[in-house]
Image (cartoon, coloured by chain):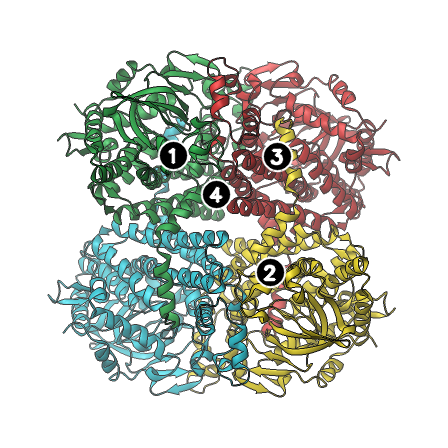
Chain colours: A cyan, B yellow, C green, D red
Amino acid sequence: MALKTVEQYYESLKDLHPTTYILGEKVENALEHPLIKHMTAAVARTYGMENEPEGKKYLVANSDIIGEEVSRFVKFYKSPDDLLAKVRMLKFIAQRIGGCFMRCTGMDGINSVGIEVYNCDQKYGTNYWDRLLNFVKLVQQNDFVVFSGVTDVKGDRSLRPSQQKDPDMYLHVVERDSKGIVVRGAKIHQTGSICAHWGLIIPTREMREADKDYAVCFAVPTDAEGIIHVYGRGTLEARALQDCDLGNVKYSKFSPMVIFKDVFIPWERVFLCGEHEFAGEMVRNFGNYHRHSHGGCKCGVGDVLIGAAATATDYNGLPNVSHINNKLAEMLKVTEAIYGCSIAASVESTPTPSGIYNVDPVLSNTSKLYEGKELAEVIRMMIEIAGGMVADIPSDRDFDHPEIGPLLHKYLKGVDSVSTENRVRIFRLIEKLAFESRDIVSNIHGAGSPETHRMTILRNADIESKKKLAKNLAGIKEE
Amino acid sequence: MALKTVEQYYESLKDLHPTTYILGEKVENALEHPLIKHMTAAVARTYGMENEPEGKKYLVANSDIIGEEVSRFVKFYKSPDDLLAKVRMLKFIAQRIGGCFMRCTGMDGINSVGIEVYNCDQKYGTNYWDRLLNFVKLVQQNDFVVFSGVTDVKGDRSLRPSQQKDPDMYLHVVERDSKGIVVRGAKIHQTGSICAHWGLIIPTREMREADKDYAVCFAVPTDAEGIIHVYGRGTLEARALQDCDLGNVKYSKFSPMVIFKDVFIPWERVFLCGEHEFAGEMVRNFGNYHRHSHGGCKCGVGDVLIGAAATATDYNGLPNVSHINNKLAEMLKVTEAIYGCSIAASVESTPTPSGIYNVDPVLSNTSKLYEGKELAEVIRMMIEIAGGMVADIPSDRDFDHPEIGPLLHKYLKGVDSVSTENRVRIFRLIEKLAFESRDIVSNIHGAGSPETHRMTILRNADIESKKKLAKNLAGIKEE
Amino acid sequence: MALKTVEQYYESLKDLHPTTYILGEKVENALEHPLIKHMTAAVARTYGMENEPEGKKYLVANSDIIGEEVSRFVKFYKSPDDLLAKVRMLKFIAQRIGGCFMRCTGMDGINSVGIEVYNCDQKYGTNYWDRLLNFVKLVQQNDFVVFSGVTDVKGDRSLRPSQQKDPDMYLHVVERDSKGIVVRGAKIHQTGSICAHWGLIIPTREMREADKDYAVCFAVPTDAEGIIHVYGRGTLEARALQDCDLGNVKYSKFSPMVIFKDVFIPWERVFLCGEHEFAGEMVRNFGNYHRHSHGGCKCGVGDVLIGAAATATDYNGLPNVSHINNKLAEMLKVTEAIYGCSIAASVESTPTPSGIYNVDPVLSNTSKLYEGKELAEVIRMMIEIAGGMVADIPSDRDFDHPEIGPLLHKYLKGVDSVSTENRVRIFRLIEKLAFESRDIVSNIHGAGSPETHRMTILRNADIESKKKLAKNLAGIKEE
Amino acid sequence: MALKTVEQYYESLKDLHPTTYILGEKVENALEHPLIKHMTAAVARTYGMENEPEGKKYLVANSDIIGEEVSRFVKFYKSPDDLLAKVRMLKFIAQRIGGCFMRCTGMDGINSVGIEVYNCDQKYGTNYWDRLLNFVKLVQQNDFVVFSGVTDVKGDRSLRPSQQKDPDMYLHVVERDSKGIVVRGAKIHQTGSICAHWGLIIPTREMREADKDYAVCFAVPTDAEGIIHVYGRGTLEARALQDCDLGNVKYSKFSPMVIFKDVFIPWERVFLCGEHEFAGEMVRNFGNYHRHSHGGCKCGVGDVLIGAAATATDYNGLPNVSHINNKLAEMLKVTEAIYGCSIAASVESTPTPSGIYNVDPVLSNTSKLYEGKELAEVIRMMIEIAGGMVADIPSDRDFDHPEIGPLLHKYLKGVDSVSTENRVRIFRLIEKLAFESRDIVSNIHGAGSPETHRMTILRNADIESKKKLAKNLAGIKEE
């Protein structure tokens, strides 16, 4: 019961009516829209996997809250094994979706919020932890999709939230009464928000006393009054709009901006409100967890990158060429390092007072740094291996054209044993993998930017103890 | 007279009626098509520059053939200074177009063909050089645009032209009589072919005796009977088709596949026909020249990448941040190395028997190797500096929408002094610079792939003499 | 009893009289020699750690063979936890030695031999496993140091062992009778062989039928008759010979060539003799284990590199400089990736029929590839951060000189709070870390060369399954 | 007459008696010392080349000052061609020395000082330019070796010269009278100071009003009273002290610290004294020139690195292995980029009021950045290609030993056609090239550190104009 089927997921979406704008138009039935449906399909596929024998091993776990099998996407991380299982699950799914399936932000959000609301309750006697448990129960029982709304629009980057000329550049509380609070602001890059049932909204940075109205965390249905989803356009819309040349024939990604136009949140869904000293840790936890998530999913995508490049090589007639093998090994090196560091960050995780385990921040940020810097090189190598056809193949519609179709089938053939259609398909997939802006930018900026990862590593690496090691070996005795 | 104006260029195109297919449709007036016109505008801009004082310094030279001022795009390289002037011209233009303007393949083609037809005449007493001179005269007098058709579709990459199951996978002579020859085959990645007046068709690889029908070089009008241009689709068509969110508001690039369906070429336009031993050198010359060209134009584009990143930084409110400055310096390092090695390849050029100067192959290929490998990192750094908004900004049409437009203008503002519109514009430009597949793939595969460049470097670097240097220093006396 | 103290280790060495040549002289008391004693001290230090509370947690384990506490250096890997414990132990020790302590080759050797002799017994009914167990028992009971002799001198690299002009270029059996075998050949880069009690000799590559005399594995005391250790000189001997400017004041490394001049091995110490099909797997196991070991020890050394650079920064008066912090973060990134991938290779280890666990080969080779390529960059960054003084500081003896000593103390002072002596000490340590050839070359060639690691990754990565993932997503249905 | 022979150079040194300390001892006849003589030999070799037909083409130029042929090492850069000739000369020599020959700091110093003293005279009516001309005449007429003393010891790096606790941490004027000035301080990393006739002392950084006593430039004989040269020890002294295993059998490098213990300088040799605003430009000129010099000499050394790696490959029996060829190409790429950017910096040089040409700073610093970062990777690849024997070959004396010599000759043989002696020689050369600290650290810190190069690039790159290019293309019209 706590696990939905694909059909139940689609059915459940019908009850949602998120206000949605796409390319300048207000869209009633967003989930059917050609620019939306491929991501919904990716989310739906995770429900499918929950109900299949192999997938179940990765995606389903027992909840100690509701005492039932639940989706691992809505479970607390209660041990290093939970964190290992998460990384392996994300890799497994990403290998089969070839990109984002958007359910990990909610999972990482619930856990990062959990650690801090527990701490907050200990300090202030608040009851956030119980509220959160109730919310998680609801989510587990219904196998809901939750997106985490972290990234604010931020305005002038050199100014803190309370210093901005327009006070709404970071989401904040504009009213509060006995029933709840009213919030205003906007979150961007909200992957797949329209396919989710709930949003879990988290502060995007540490806050100080003056920013305390911005230290707010809560859950909200995606179609709550005042919430507006605005589709952010990526690079390859023409394909989806024309329903051809898709590359990845079933799945894709989108990331709306979500505007909160004075949205009411009842107190039972509020998990932080003004206790500013927990905002920073909350988002840092989220960052560390989400970088850890990338270690799984981006390695899975990496396997697709490698497989696509190797397939193109076969289709071009160049299997077992030394320099190509060398590049494939380098591609593997990077993707496995991303994965390996996330595995290690799980093994070296540590418990927090809430009972939730925190990943090792140095290792999870190391994983993400390799993604941020070197996955681009993996993609470049994929293009290099595949060849120039990544740039500019004629459209499927040209291939279907009575006059030039046969000429294209003739001239774009590679090795004799493979149809031109299949050859074109693999190049289209490579194009999608290389040029879908939402994916590529996510490699760099998802879960924070490389500079953030570097600073997180530095802050957590205990340089002082390393200095002592060096001084001991050098024979330096410090006064 | 030998320099066209912009208007004259557009006028001259009206006489051309290239057979063109775009996204599955035969298009009559291709040059007006939204997917074509931005590249035509880029070509036209070069004519504008020829007629402006500053541009003229870069784009105009004296011809020793027709004794008049001509476009440098149709001139032989008769000195190191000509090669230096070429690199500087290409940088100058690319800085102002932000991408490809497609006139360099013709220039590089004429010169690479010239060297070898001269050699061929010396060996076989053919009269190719005179034919080529006549063609160049025609081109100079009319300031024509010439594209060079080099890259064949190639079929199974492990087989030579004459070994392919389908003999047409490399362009070849299928008939010959007293008037001329008939050719069949297909060339791909023919940047801007539809905006050119003529094509100069060059073999794509070295040929052996058995491949001698494939050792064919000739000039042909772009609308000759039997020639079909098929638009190869890139990543950002939706923008051009909807005429919004262009990024680069005036210019773009496309690269058709050009099919030769039994095209007749009169002997006076044939510059090689069967003398297979010159085919390899011809295309190797072309490769070296064209890698040298990239040293200019990609450095110019690099300046735009750097400028765009620095502008985004200002607009985000983050000027003078240490790690951003560091990245800007690294971006400069790569683009200047690309440029510097092309400048050096000009200085160290050497004359051939034809009087045409050949660039230093080690240096020109070094330039291209940095482009092929490190320009991707420059682009990654641009994205890293600019921020996540590169991924998914709402469309211009959303900004114009009465309901959400004002909200978007409010929430996507950066520093107070810059309008949201301008901020969005710079992000759209960055998106175009980062994700236009034709440009990005060209960085890697244009003028040959990195592996080719490595092998060219190795073949030309005289490793034996370097071994001697090492042995001398080690005190090794070889028997 | 099964754990030796430092004193017992030194005492035990007195019974050994390995034939040793150093810089052209036969040396009687090699262990006192200035070029030997610093490595012996490093080995001795591991005995010290076995007997200290903190060290014991890392270095001591229970043996299921002799039912006692034994050094982890002589234990079989019977679980993923054993492999995790190994990585952590090596990191712990390397942080405190700042380099090699040479006990891991024996540990890796015992395990890699173990897996294959078990398999060989299964196939051929040999009794190698029992012999090995007896040897391991002996080693455990006496807490012996074992070095693994893997790398043969190899002669002409393009030829297999049996094809070499001189048949001795790979170690092989030259005689055999009822008592044992006689072997001839030479192993190079035998780190610390003179400080070990036993050698475990392993084939260096896969062998074919024709090479079967080369498929030989055995244990032998380091001072057996016919064994000659020839010191291989490194870069910094002058320091040790003059006993000043050491950098690492206590520890160092050396790697002799070990020549087997017709050495007799009794059958009870022979673990493979002619069963050529197990030679390849034996050394591949060893390679994978030893790359996994490097993940621990080189990360530990990496911590020293980072600590030394950070200390130099303090002493130079440049703490908290943005670009230096950035470099420290990059240094951490690489060392943590090396470590993280070894941790992950432990977690994803799998049992073999012998009960010994094999590390994940893709992850352990990924770890080593980062070491082979990027640790050099970590060292370069250490030099960059520290400054030019790494190159050429006057000698300790100059600092002690009555005339110039005071001038040097005056002029080479950095920040006021640190003595010149300490500043010089940290630079000397950095010099040692950057320029000790045995360490630096080991980063690249230890446990095989990067090309081997790439090929191992490729062979184990199941590219075919990744192709399937890509084809599924592209919609390719293969006939 | 203005060109010395080798013999005349050696003869001229006999008149010099620099006060010299080496490894704690005052040395009378420093030039014969085993740690000094190999660098003197390198300098002497440049005199030899001046007198040989091929060398003369590179090393000899006409002086417009004395109207004779002079060494290019003591000539002003009066045209882009002079700068091109310099780069080519340095490459030519470095290919034949395999390292430093120390004559370029003087050449770069004379020119960088020249530009600023001319400017200073214009502003203040001083007569520095005439004094400098007189000094240059003297140097040209005698073909003297001049070292440039730039790098001060610097003390606490966070403090300016006048803020240091000890005022002597930067060289400064401590007295002045009608005859001249007295200076105190210390310069480090003074490559080959003992083999030079004169030093040209230049401020190491920009100076402010408060630092004006530190804004001092002058020429001084290397054996002037009060000057003390203290040998700074490098990594490989044992070889030179034992006269074996040298690697580079003739040439090497050393870099003393030069202490100025109240040295008197007559006014006629003083070229700046208190005009602080010229100090910064002087050293920045020097930096740019010297980075430009590295473009020549380090490319020449790079050729030796490549040749040594390729020779080792032959000797190991592995010619024409794909991955090795790939690495050789990458090694070429880096060294050619270093060279190419210096060539380009010459071509794009610009005249200063003095008539001396300044190199393009962006290109010369780009060249040096590649050296600083990527030459380390070239060296790593050399080690990777050559193999583990780089780490630890037995000594020449072992090879000569009656007992083990024959065994070593037997076992360290590679391909049949090459003697073991020659194989060992090439490995020793590789060791020298990879591990001579003075050379390796010079790659990184010579002519300033990478961070300096980045900042120089950024300061000179005109980012504002690049922003304009981007804004134009994005359609941004700024108010």
Give the residue pinned by disc 1: C211
Give the amino acid type for the residue marked by disc 4 in the picture.
Answer: Glu
Q: Which mark is residue B448?
A: 2
Marked residue chain, label 1: C
Q: Quadrant of residue D189?
A: top right
Of tags 2 and 4, the one toward the viewer is 2
Of tags 2 and 3, the one toward the viewer is 2
In front: B123, or D339?
A: B123
Q: Are marks 2 and 3 in contact (CB under 8 Å)?
A: no
Q: Are the numbered discs 1 and 4 placed on the same chain, yes or no? A: yes
Look at the numbered disc 2 and give the secondary structure of its residue: loop
C70 sits to left or right of B265 = left
Distance (Cα) linking label 2 and label 4: 30 Å
Marked residue chain, label 4: C
Q: Quadrant of residue A105?
A: bottom left
Q: Earlier in the sequence, mark 1 or mark 4?
A: 1
Give the residue pinned by disc 3: D151
Q: Residue furthest left?
A: A67
Q: Are the numbered discs 1 and 2 placed on the same chain, yes or no? A: no
Provide residue D370's location: percent of width, then percent of height. Answer: 58, 47
Q: Is residue A42 above or below residue C415?
A: below
Give the amino acid type for the residue marked by disc 2 in the picture.
Answer: Gly
Q: Are marks 2 and 4 in contact (CB under 8 Å)?
A: no
Provide residue B468's location: percent of width, then percent of height. Answer: 65, 34
Q: Are marks 3 and 4 in contact (CB under 8 Å)?
A: no
Provide residue D75's location: percent of width, then percent of height. Answer: 79, 37
